[in-house]
Image (spheres, rainbow, N blue to C red):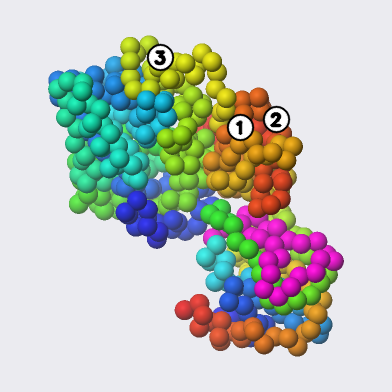
Amino acid sequence: MYPADRKYTKDHEWIRIGGTTAEIGITDFAQQQLGDVVFVDLPEPGKSIAAGDSFGSIESVKAVSELYAPMSGEVVEVNSSLKDHPEVINKDPHGTWMIKVRLTNAADTGALLDSGQYQDLTK
Amino acid sequence: MVPFAGWDMPVEYSGVTNEHMAVRTRAGVFDVSHMGEIEIAGKDALAAVQHISSNDASRLSVGQAHYSALTTPDGTFVDDLLVYRMAPSHFMLVVNASNIEKDYQWIAAQIAKVGEAACVDSSSRYALIAIQGPAAREVLQPLTGVDLNEMKYYWFASGEVASALATISRTGYTGEDGFEIFCRPNQADQVWQALLEAGRSADVIPCGLAARDTLRLEAAMRLYGNDVDETTTVLEADLGWIVGWKKPSFIGLERLREQKEKGVARRIVGFEMVDRGIARHGYQAVRGGEQVGVVTSGTQTPFLKKAIGMAYLPVELTAPDTVFEIDVRGRPSKAKVVPMPFYKRPR
């Protein structure tokens, strides 16, 4: 159920790499744990993010959680439709990217999980 | 499921937004059996209740209930509660689950000085099932011989629900019309199932703790431990209407009178976020870089679709439309004071 075309973090983000850029979102497991998402706070384009650091936050009715960068890079695009429709993250978590990042080193995926490893983590 | 005051409580069944909207538009069923019941009876039961509770229980008829505060000598909250007059000299206090033991000890010690009255913690003898929402009456009515149409808001009656012995009370914690049903724990399942079955065609659904919290907040009902506690007075909580000012005495009356005359320094307000963001319990209210108050409750509400909350602010900042800032995890975000309740049901 976790697409094999991307990598995952232990903090429940996914990253889909295409060349030197990547899309980042959260997993179906994460959205289930959060419940109804009502607010997403994302960085502006141009901001540098470092692997493992918080790049924003996501809030459900219940609680707020940090979003952690799977890899380092520079934000090139932000999914602005999430401002008014954060609930699409619940409906289609793997089809909804939050930010696009130009990666510092696209080959540096060593610490990330593949879909099978991530699936095991959520069991 | 989450542990809550010794109970395993469902946070949500089908999702907080879905459950919240069901209660605003149809009806939802809640298991709130964790709530505590403390009964006071005896020749001087009325005097005992009058001594410990801020509201004026002499104004209650048998079959009537009201909201009140169990007050400290400082006029702050030992707890907030509903007082039911079961018989002329028999009262039932419905208290918060996390406070049952504390309340019972407090009440027993205080009423010992009053006269002939005894108190009993009968929490384990009652389950409590609530049905809340505009369709609540039509769903519950076929299950009981009690004429619900005749029951006024904050009145109650004894009877049966789905063949279980029950006390039905037209009360709730959601801002909607609705009923709370006290029954024996071994018959709670029967009542719960019957309500959901009777409500099936109206799409009545079970609701959890999360929806209970967002619903009560839209209705601006205070939550003990968040909005009121032993550090907040009844007047600071803007609940002067539950103070029986004409009563000759009760615990805390002198301090509350004094505070009423001098005026409070801070008061609870409702607010709406102006900037994007959601304020949560414990966030600081700031103005000019200085902390001026604290957020006690806050959420994004499913029905109003706004980020709202309650906060204690200095009284000079409590006028509607006053703008202040809330420190939302390091980011100052504008909010403005708005009148409460945030939501009022259409009548």
Type of residue at label 1?
Leu
A52 up-or-down from B345: above or below: below
Instruction: Give the total of numbered labels.
Output: 3
Q: Which residues are magenta?
A: A35-59
The chain containing the residue under callout 1 comes to B
Give the Cα separation between the discs numbered 3 and 1.
25 Å
Q: Residue at x 50, y 29 (%)?
A: B237
> Residue B119 colored magenta?
no
Q: Earlier in the sequence, mark 2 or mark 3?
A: 3
Checking the image for residue B313, the label placed there is 1
Residue A89 position in % (x across, y down): 64, 64
> Residue A48 colored magenta?
yes
The residue labelled by disc 2 is B322
- Residue B272 vs residue A108: left or right? left
Secondary structure category for the residue under label 3:
loop
Q: Earlier in the sequence, mark 1 or mark 2?
A: 1
Co-location on one chain, circles 3 and 1: yes
